[in-house]
């Protein structure tokens, strides 16, 4: 559905926002045409600029990345099994493998950060022929 608004030509000629509104000047009047598509697009842009949408937008890459990983790395499209139950079991193992790798990666990153935070060195207290005493210096 289209909405048309007719205005006085003199009003539109002196308006500072005339460039933005898109009013078309005719012989005696001016008119503004707003289509349903324009309204729909404006509401869509308003929704996209909200805070909730930006939070959801950040999750999108993670959601779309998983099927891509399953296809490229774990070859889900060509599993060598037949039957619904076996396919589900294989698929579950592949998902489990992804989860296990993520947990191991996260654990190694945490261990690396802890190792970098704790810097230690050793100092010799006494050293003899068969024995050496070490002191942990933080």
Image: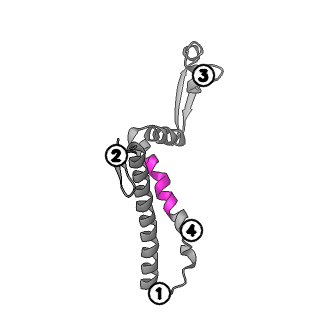
As helix, strand or loop, the secondary structure at mark 3 comes to: helix
Label disc, if present, on residue 83 of the rendered structure: 1
Mark 4 vs mark 3, CA separation in Å: 53 Å
Question: Which residue sits at x=57%, y=13%?
Answer: 10
As helix, strand or loop, the secondary structure at mark 1 comes to: loop
Give the residue furthest to the right.
27
Q: Earlier in the sequence, mark 2 or mark 4?
A: 4
Which residue is under mark 4? Answer: 73
Circle 2/circle 3 CB separation < 8 Å: no
Label disc, if present, on residue 136 of the rendered structure: 2
Question: Which residue sits at x=39%, y=39%?
Answer: 51
Q: Which of marks 4 and 3 is nearer the N terminus?
A: 3
Of marks 1 and 4, the one in the foreground: 4
Mark 1 vs mark 4, CA separation in Å: 22 Å
Circle 2/circle 1 CB separation < 8 Å: no
Q: Earlier in the sequence, mark 1 or mark 4?
A: 4
Q: In this view, does 17 lie to the left or right of 99?
A: right
Question: Which residue sits at x=45%, y=70%?
Answer: 97
Of marks 4 and 3, the one in the foreground: 4
- Point out residue 68 in the picture as x, y percentages from the top left corner: 55, 63
Which residue is under mark 3? Answer: 19
Q: Earlier in the sequence, mark 2 or mark 1?
A: 1
Judge by depth and name the residue closer to the eye, 75 or 37: 75
Judge by depth and name the residue closer to the eye, 121 or 74: 121
Q: Give the range drawn in magenta.
A: 56-66
Label disc, if present, on residue 60 of the rendered structure: none
Q: Is residue 66 above or below residue 59?
A: below
**Does residue 70 belong to the magenta stretch?**
no
Q: Earlier in the sequence, mark 2 or mark 3?
A: 3
Q: Quadrant of residue 23?
A: top right
């Amino acid at each position: 559905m289209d909405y048309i608004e007719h205005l006085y030509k003199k009003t539109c000629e002196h308006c500072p926002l005339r460039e933005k509104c898109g009013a078309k000047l005719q012989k005696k009047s001016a008119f503004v045409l707003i289509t349903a598509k324009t309204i729909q697009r404006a509401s869509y842009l308003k929704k996209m600029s909200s805070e909730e949408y930006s939070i959801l937008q950040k999750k999108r890459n993670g959601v779309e990345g998983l099927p891509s990983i399953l296809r490229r790395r774990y070859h889900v499209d060509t599993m060598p099994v037949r039957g619904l139950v076996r396919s589900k079991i294989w698929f579950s193992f592949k998902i489990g493998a992804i989860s296990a790798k993520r947990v191991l990666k996260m654990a190694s990153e945490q261990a690396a950060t802890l190792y970098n935070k704790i810097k230690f060195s050793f100092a010799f207290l006494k050293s003899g022929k068969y024995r050496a005493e070490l002191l942990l210096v933080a």
